[in-house]
Image (tube, rainbow, N blue to C red):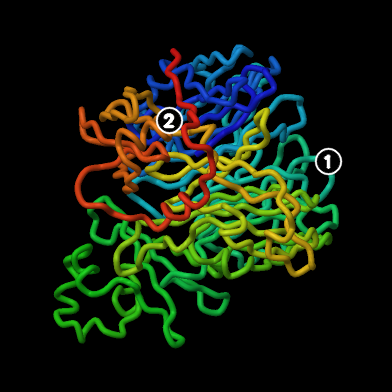
Amino acid sequence: MLAVADVNDDGLDDMFIGGAKGQAGKLLIQQPGGRFVSTNERVFDADAGSEDIGAVFFDADGDGHPDLYVVSGGSEFSQMAPALQDRLYLNDGRGNFRKAVGSLPDEDVSGSRVVAADYDGDGDVDLFVGGRVVPWHYGVDPRSLLLRNDGHGHFTDATQRLAPELERVGMVTDAVWRDVDRDGRPDLIVVGEWMPITVFHNAGGGKLVRLKTPGLEKSEGWWNRIVAGDFTGHGRVDFIVGNLGLNTRLHASEAEPLTMYVKDFDGSGVSKQILSVYNHGTSYPIAMRDELIRALPYLKARFPRYADYAGRTVTDIFSPAELAGATFKQAHTLGTALARNNGDGSFTLVPLPLEAQLAPVYGILAQDVDGDGKPDLLLAGNFDGVQPEIGRMSASYGLVLRGDGVGRFTPVPAVQSGFSVPGQARDIQRVRTRRGDLYVVARNNDRALVFRSSPPVPLSLWERGSRGGGLAAGPLGLDDDDSVGGPHAVHRRLGGVLQHLDRLDVVRIDASEGAARAGLHRHVVDHVQGLVAPVERRDPADANGDAAIGGPRHDHAGKAVHQHLLDRPAGRALDLFRRHD
């Protein structure tokens, strides 16, 4: 999770990178030379017990400086856990932050994203905070919050008064404020798992009314991300929405939706989820007999043999009384898509190319990366946290989609774009530097990747697109001068990296010196909530600055691609993080 802003008013973008439970987030201040320095560590270390799920920089107290709101969440906490309380950090204008105690309403929502806008038109910036999940009860709609700013950085919960339909809108994963109907007021568009793309019209005075938007009535999906822009050239607000993709065992359509029943069937205090998918015209549970009986042992007497269970639907397995009171969810579309604004209050969902459907999409950046004046797309994702019978959803290595400005997108092969993202990407952000834009990709349980656009190259080096032209700008490439690593400091040795369990950062080293001392072995790094090597272990580091873990070699498919993309003179010193308190 990334948030970007110029927090110290020096004209350079700075970054906040969120941390997992037990790992503090980091505020990285960009230096004039292009390196990033971790600051305010004592402030964020105090909240390391929370898991950072979303964040936004905005002016909370009206002093003209970007303050920071961080959403707490995750599924590792029980309800009422103090670690689920969101946090607000106020900026003095020089990049020094302090936690604003008592400025937020008390809450224990396991949240997702926060988006900022002056929705009530009173001149200060307010917030929407999406609820992601009810701990131990996946599928039950959590509480989302519409927070109103008093102009001095104190927030109250105005959801019931101004937007009661928003409070339990669903399992929110993302949202965006945009003036969809061009009435001068920001509307709110919300997406989530098992949710339709939902538009809340701003009726004035901050009152948000849920619309029945034509074209989005059956848009329930497993949406992960939404970004806004004029992708069709009509001057209207369109959306790119990241979904589960079309390369999994799960499939859905308007006629044959993916469904889920959620209930604490056995009174254990933990909700069970019964997913079903259509096969030859009938919806069957995904769970096999043994799996279902492990979760609900009382069903063993009902289905003593596999033959007794075979071909059963949810309504065959459970009685009407057992299903009574269950939460019912369904999804009708799983493809990542363009939501095209038709200009008459309706939208049309247009699937993106098949290359964008290989895996779940979590990170989306709409940016003109080829210099032709039309918005392009950077996509990344993957998800490994699924049961074996469903299968890992990790077929994507990132994707650049070249936009033609009228709503069509053409995939650019990775060997041309230079954009290759292995692992589980979760966010993509643009960061301005004096040497041009960086594109930073945050990954789950891994260090961030940094890409910089190369200088323009001759068109002959690019495969010409369908319009007969080539990309105007050079390809993206991994940037080794602006290293972004894990969120903790490091111990440094010449030509190597010493990592231990409470200080987990990555150091970039001098390439030739590292080669001379350690050899350019290319290993996969073991990751547990960051780059973690055994205590006091001194392993060589490769030319990427990754620590080489002892034992058998495990070649990663993305490593060869990354090595091909690296293009720097031998012996060039690479930047590293420094710890500043």
- Report if residue 212 is visible in the image: no
Name the side, left or right, on which 64 lies relative to 568.
Answer: right
| Viewer-nearest residue: 390 or 134 | 390
Report the amino acid beneath label 2: Asp
Quarter residue 328 falls in: bottom left
| Viewer-nearest residue: 350 or 305 | 350
For the C terminus, which image quadrant? top left
Label 2 CA crowd tier, 10 Å (few <14, some 14–19, many 20+): many
Report the amino acid beneath label 1: Gly
User: Residue 122: where, in percent of width, then height?
Assistant: 76, 26
Q: Is residue 43 above or below residue 551?
A: above
Quarter residue 287 falls in: bottom left
User: Residue 272: where, in percent of width, then height?
Assistant: 31, 59
Q: SS class of the residue under badge 1?
A: loop
Q: Is residue 444 above or below residue 342?
A: above
Q: Earlier in the sequence, mark 2 or mark 1?
A: 1
Count of residue discs: 2
Q: Which residue in the structure is indicated by mark 2?
A: 510
Quarter residue 41 falls in: top left
| Viewer-nearest residue: 237 or 485 | 485
Q: SS class of the residue under badge 2?
A: loop
Q: Which residue in the structure is indicated by mark 1?
A: 184
